[in-house]
Each structure stands twice: as structure tokens, then as C-alpha cells.
Amino acid sequence: MLKLVRRVLVLVLVLSGISVLCLKAIHGAEDKIAEEASVRKAYAEKIRATYSFPFGKDKLSMPGNAAAVGGDFLEASAFPDAAYCGHCHQEAYHEWRQALHSNSFRTPFYRTSVNIVMRTKGIEFARHCDSCHNPIAVLAGGLNENATINRSFDRDGLTCTTCHSIQSVDTKLGNGSYVMGVPAVMVDEQGNRIPGIVPDEEILANLDRHKEAVMKDIYHSPEFCSACHKANLPPALNGYKWIRAFTAYDEWQNSKFSQRNPLTFYNADFTTCQNCHMKPTAITLPDYGAKDGKLASHRWLAGNTAVPFYYGFDEQLSKTIEFLKSGNFLNVDIFALKKMDGTAANLALIAPLGTEPFTLKPDETIQAYVVVQNKNIGHSLIPEVRDLYEAWVQFTAKDGTGAVIYDSGFLKPDGTLEPGAHSFTNRPVDVIGDFVDNHRVWAIHSVAYDNTVQAGRSALIRYQFDIPADIKGPLTITAKVNYRHLRQSYLNNIFGPAHPAYPVVEIASRTRMLNIGDNPITAPLPTDNADWMRWNNLGIGYLDQLQHDDAIYAFEQVVRLRPDYKDGYINLGLTYIDWEKYSEAREPLEKALTLHPDDARALYYLALVERRQRHSEAEIADLQKVVAQYPQSRDARRELGISFYQQHRADEAMEQFKALQGIDPDDLAAHYNLAVLYRRMGMKKEAAEQSALYTAKRIDPGAPTYSLEYLRKHPEISTESVPWHVHMETMHANTSATGQP
């Protein structure tokens, strides 16, 4: 009995001690939270006293969209630096230090552009850029005339506690559309965020509370990335009108990898941004965040070779180049030859190359058809600032001695890309029709052309050249997609012409050796697509170039080779619809549905046929089936809304257009139709709002004039604005094997 009493007393004393410690910890956390709130309030009041709000009261980040919990400023000192996190996360810190995110603000490439903004428009306008590139500067009130805050955080750009303090994002906006919480690496037992530095020992003793503070489910989603990998140019920035800048997130959402869009040409497993750019990799340094010896990569490998090259981050550079050259992303196919002697027989395609015998003779003029497939990129080629990045096709033809017969897409002696190259870029122009250089995005009024290749689609590029009469065979032709980050003229603007040559990476290529004389059938390479897919990609290229008859022929070859492939028939139907031959579209679409009943892609296009043939009930029924399968399909929601609208079913039409705006807030059809429907229902305020959005986001009718002026000034590249064109032999022919004159 005495032993039992002693045990009880000991237990009571122990529990009492724990209780005291817990109470101290709770009160300590409460005191720290209260202290931070007081410090923040005083800091915010001080900043507000002199802060400029030119874009509206309390719009602290406009023309960006960054925000903080509580709607007020956060002191820069509230953000623990990355070195602190590196105590326990050595691998993540090491990778992050060389990655673009940690260098998002300090690089000369970014600084050149943002400094121009500040010099020409004012520091307040740089909030648009820095909401993503330097969130601490924006939220601390540092982007203000005569701001005196300590800017030591500049060197860390997007530091650990910026990304890991974000509480929510808005996928509709971009431009830094996140809400930042007070930075914390721990929560208390009630889940309240404990601001500031916490000893490593306390974190390690409470890993669950550490994880609750720094990890949220949204961090694993593409929506998280959308906060910054989506941008627009608002009137507050450019004094002109709203212009969509880039939409990497929307491109992913419309790709096969999102599984949200039934209209993709190919299918794939669900894949997020993180699945591609943050793949778990084996650690080389200790890291408590690793699982089974692997950690989600904090290198965010993508296409930026310029930053690691500039800073001498050899490890990051080599891994970036390895990533680009992995062979997973593009397929290059020298699909066909066409002899250009004018006879009907020779004008037919020799296609697909390798599958049928043919002959070549000296002194013939031939066209080579190159198809570049954006095969496994979850966004376009190129996805974001296409005015700065350079990806292009280099096509060469050489004789048996290695002498160059034809070269398109070579680099000139000064490092610039020859103007006749086919590049996957664009040409933004200003109000007087000049190229918008140095990424002066606020000056953009139009885009003269945009040669990007959307995810899952293909580009068809034609090259025409003469086979010399005295050629020493065989003829070797090569097509490769090269990539450089950044274009030479921009590098020259930053450093002057005397700077090292920045890396040019070959992403994908294909070479074929052609005999002068007879050419037999040849076996495909392991990297070649199957013949049915080669025809399919050609058809996609034709379709995007509005060559409908040729696209029909290509897709007919697909179903000939793969009669079980339902998408081949759907592609035929799609092409007929695009050609406005609705009656012809019905048969292949119905054939696809016999192979795959209730296929959403076939039903969508069949609904468009039913609409044209005034079968309203069938049209609506088909689209409803599509929406049921793909509730986040922008196209299906839009067309179903239009169908209901045309049948005077206003409530149902409004439901679809509202749902569409939840997916794509920039959809013009939704704005326009909702404005009309609200007006009819007497909802004048809502109608005015939608009408204003439609007016703001629709293209300026005068904008094409600026593009035409630019193309008139630059005839050497004006053909790039034509849906289909041929790259002809030029003065660059008969250059040396290096491609130099």
C-alpha cells in the first residue's frame, strides 16, 4: 500500500512538472504571437505614413497581386533567412542556392528590366514584377520612394519562408496572387503560428508541429505554381488596357497532363508541375526532409541556363542541360520530301521518309518537311517570356564531303540568330510598330506573330533548297531544336557585345542520309514515332496552318494504319468542322463513338455538328455528357452555355458561364453572354461589371495595325506571321560547315 502511495505521489509530481512546462510553452508561444502582432502593427503604421498608394487605397502591391494575412505590411525581419533552414535541410539549401528561385531578384538579367521600369515609370510600378521576384520587398513596403528598409533579403529572392508561408493562392489572377502568412516554422498546440526563430532542438522534438507550420496540401498542386507562373499586364501598369502576358498554368490545365480537358490530341497520366520540376532525387547532404534517401528537388530544373552560367553554378548548369537533353520532351521528324519540278507526280509527298523507296538526282529542287512535336511538355514551347528566350530549328544539308549546301537557323559571327530561322518565339510590338526590347512589357500593344507550340501539338516547318549539279553524295540532312537562355541581343543589352557565349543546348534532333540515286526503305530509330503517329502529327501541323485538305489526307492515313484508333476519326471530324464542312464531319465522329461509346472528345465535336444541323436537344445532351465527365473543361462549359443561351434557357446558360469563369476568368464569351443575360434580367450592376470586363479583355481593334507596321519594317521575318510558309534557300547557302558566311 505504501509503495502504491509513493508511486501515485511520484506520478502526480511528474505530471505537475509536465503541466508547468506545457503552460510555460503555451504562454511563451502566446507571448511571442502577441509580440509579433504588436511589432507588425507598429511597423505597418510607420510604413503607411509615407507609402505611396497610386493604384487605390490599401492596394499595397498593385499592379501586382501579393497580399498578406491581415491585409497589412510585414516587416522584413519576420522572414527567417534560408541559412537558418539550412541547419536541418542541407540538401534543400544547397540545391536552392543554385536554383533560379533563390536568384530571382539579384541577377543582372532581371535587374536590367526591372530597373528600366523604375527609371521610366517609378518604383511603385516595379511592385508588378517583384510580387513574384521579391515578395519580401513588396510586403515589407520596400518598393516606395526613399524607402529605408534593410534590403539584405535581396540576395535570397524567393527564400524558404516565402513559399512555405503562403496560405492560399488565386489561380485566376497571377502576378503574385498569393496570401502570405506571418512566417513561422512552428505552430503551438492549438495550431497558431509561432513567428520568428525557434531553436532547432524544439523543432526536432515537435516535427508534427513544424510540418503543420511549413507544409500545406496546396504546395503539391499546380494551383500553387499558378500564383506566379501566370501573369497579365493590367491598365495600372501600361496605361493602355488589360493584356494577358503568359499562362503556363492555363497551358498545363489545357494539356493532356491535367486530365481536365477532353480535347487534347493525346492522353497521359495525371502529372503536376511538381511531378516534372521537383522530382524526388537522391540526397548527397543530410536533410531531415528526405524520405528513403530522396528529397523533392529544390533545383526546379527547367530551361534557365543563363543564371547558373553567369554565377558559375556548374552543378546546376550541368543538371539543367541534362534535363533539357533528356529526350523526353520533343520529337523531331524529317517526315517527307517533295520534289519541286512542277509535275504532279513529283509534287506528291515522299512520305513518311523511310517507308517507301525513292530516287534523288543532282540539280533537283526539293522541300523537306520537318515536324516538331511538343510531346511531353506540360505547357507550350516556349512557355513564358518568349521575347527573351530562344528556341529554334536549325536545318542543314551537307554533301558527302561535309560541305554545307543549305543552312537555316545558324548563329552569325556576332552570336545572333540568323533572321530566316524558324523560332518558337514571338515579336511583341509597341504603339509605333517597333519591337519591345529589354522586356519593357508595359509598352506592348500587339504581337506581330507567335510561333509557340502548345502542349501536345506539332509544328510543320518546310525547307526548300537545290541539290547541286556536281554534288558529291550522299546528302545528309539534319533538323534539330536548339535552345538558348537568353537571346543574344538581350545579353548584349545587359553586358555589351563583349561577353562569353551563353550555352546553346540541342534539345532534340533527327538526321537522315539520302543517296543521290536510289534510296531503299530504311528501319526506324528507337526514338522515332510509329508511322500512324507521324501522320497524326503531320495532320495536326496542317490543321494549325489551316491546310484542311492536306490535314484530311494525313488523318486518313492514320485511320488506315490504325483503324482501331478512335482519335484518328475524331481528328477527321475536327478538321471538317474547322473547314466548316459539318455534314462530312458526322460520319467519322460517329465511327469514333462506335469504337468508344460516350467518348467526351467525340461527343464535343458531334455537338457542334448537331448545332449546325439544328438538332438542339442532341446538341445539349452531348455537351452535358462531356461536362459530366470533365467538369473543368473550359470549352465544354462555354459551348453548353451558348447552347442554353440559344434555346432561351437563361438560368442554365448563366450557370455554365459562371462555372466557366471559375475555371477561366478571362473567357470573353462568358463576359459577353453574362453581360447580356444580366441585362435582360434587370441586374444592371452585374451586367455593367461583365460588360466592363469584356471591354477590358477583348483585343484592341487597332492592335493589328501595330503588328502590320512592324512586319512591314522587317520583311526578312514577315513570313513567320503567315500560318504556313517555306524557308527558302538564301544568301546563306554554300556556307562553311560551321554555318558562318
Image: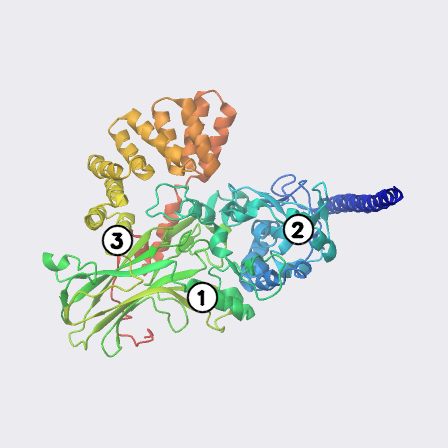
What SS does tag 3 mark? helix
Count residues near mark 2 (Cα–Cα under 10 Å), then give few for <14, some for 14-19, many for 20+: many
Q: Measured along the vertical axis of the image, is residue 571 above or below residue 716?
A: above
User: What residue type is disc 2 on?
Assistant: Asn
Q: Which quadrant of the rendered structure holds the C terminus?
A: bottom left
Frontmost of labels 2 and 3 is: 3
Q: Name the spot of residue 325 as percent of width and height, x first.
A: 41, 65
Q: Name the spot of residue 307 as percent of width and height, x first.
A: 53, 65
What SS does tag 2 mark? loop
User: What residue type is disc 3 on?
Assistant: Leu
Q: Earlier in the sequence, mark 2 or mark 3?
A: 2
Count residues near mark 1 (Cα–Cα under 10 Å), then give few for <14, some for 14-19, many for 20+: some
Report the number of numbered marks: 3
Residue 498 in the figure: left or right of residue 483 = right
Q: Which residue, given by chain and number where applicable, does mark 2 sit on?
A: 144
**Can I make out residue 260 in this image?**
yes
User: What residue type is disc 1 on?
Assistant: Glu
Q: Quadrant of residue 3?
A: top right
Q: CA distance from mark 1 to mark 2?
A: 41 Å
Q: Name the spot of residue 131 as percent of width and height, x first.
A: 59, 50
Q: Quadrant of residue 567?
A: top left
Q: Which residue, given by chain and number where applicable, does mark 1 sit on?
A: 322
Q: Earlier in the sequence, mark 3 or mark 1?
A: 1
Q: CA distance from mark 3 to mark 1?
A: 28 Å
